[in-house]
Amino acid sequence: MTQSFERYEKKYIITNAQASEMIAFLKLHMALDRHHNPKHILPYKIHSYYLDDHDARIIKKSIEKPSYKEKYRLRWYNDPTKLFLEVKIKYLKRSHKKRFEITQEELDLKDYRTLINTSYHYGYLNAITPASIGKYCLIDYERIAFDDTDKGIRVTFDFNVSYTFDNTSYPLNDEDVVILEIKYRDAFPLFLSSYLSEHKIYSRSLSKIGRSYQQYKGALL
């Protein structure tokens, strides 16, 4: 099974109090996504293994903020038997994500280059690095998400983000930090624009894997 998503994305850093207030607001306008029990607003878990070579060439290239970039990850949700290979493409300000369902055996590969090139026929990976591609960093977090599929709007709140290098986990942010993402297909939703302006919430550039790598390497103060 292959899925494809194309949209714009904006990211924000907010507090737990701001997240709670905005979630209450969104309940009036949008539905919880399919991973939730619709009767209870409880976060679900997301686990993502970012794939890279030994020298982190893919992550380093992404941190440079080129006009075009790709990232590769293995992702699963509450059900650890339902696994995906995801290719995240960003060109200028528009994001395109391709998702391929994979098997448990493919999760345990030593080198993912063939799997990536077989699933996604493009030359970016080969241009970035000739080396073998393995699991470089695991990022875990809890998410509350709202969807309006008809209008092409998705809003996510990510809590308790942590990253793991060399079998050791670290928190990415302080406990009172929530990463808000607004994803939209065409124009930015007016009701969200008005809400963010009224509450003085402003977008910023942010990459979980980029920030994790920099923090782990001591480059992020």
Image (spheres, rainbow, N blue to C red):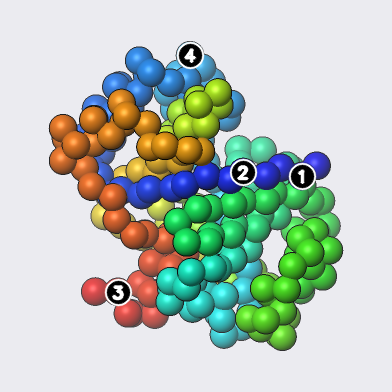
Would you place residue 162 above or below residue 127 in this image? above
Q: Tell me residue 198's x, y (percent).
A: 16, 32
User: Which circle marks residue 179 in the picture?
Assistant: none
- State how far apart marks 2 and 4 are (Cα): 27 Å
User: Which circle marks residue 5 in the picture?
Assistant: 2
User: Which circle marks residue 39 in the picture?
Assistant: 4
Q: Going from the N terminus, do you reach mark 2 or mark 4 first? A: 2
- State how far apart marks 2 and 1 are (Cα): 10 Å
- State how far apart marks 1 and 3 are (Cα): 36 Å
- Residue type for callout 1: Thr
Q: Nearer the viewer, mark 3 or mark 2?
A: 2
At numbered mark 2, what does the secondary structure look like: helix, strand or loop? strand
Q: Going from the N terminus, do you reach mark 3 or mark 2 first? A: 2
Residue that badge 1 annotates: 2
Q: Nearer the viewer, mark 4 or mark 1?
A: 1
At numbered mark 4, what does the secondary structure look like: helix, strand or loop? loop
| Quarter occupied by residue 111 | bottom right
Q: Is there a contact, CB below 8 Å, between mark 2 and mark 4?
A: no
Specify whether residue 60 is in view. Answer: yes
Q: Going from the N terminus, do you reach mark 4 or mark 1 first? A: 1
Specify whether residue 169 is in view. Answer: no
Would you place residue 87 above or below residue 44 in this image? below
Q: Going from the N terminus, do you reach mark 1 or mark 3 first? A: 1
Binning the other alpha carbons within 10 Å of mark 2 as few (below 14), some (14 to 19) or many (20 upward) gives: few
Residue that badge 3 annotates: 220
- Residue type for callout 2: Phe
Which quadrant: the C terminus? bottom left
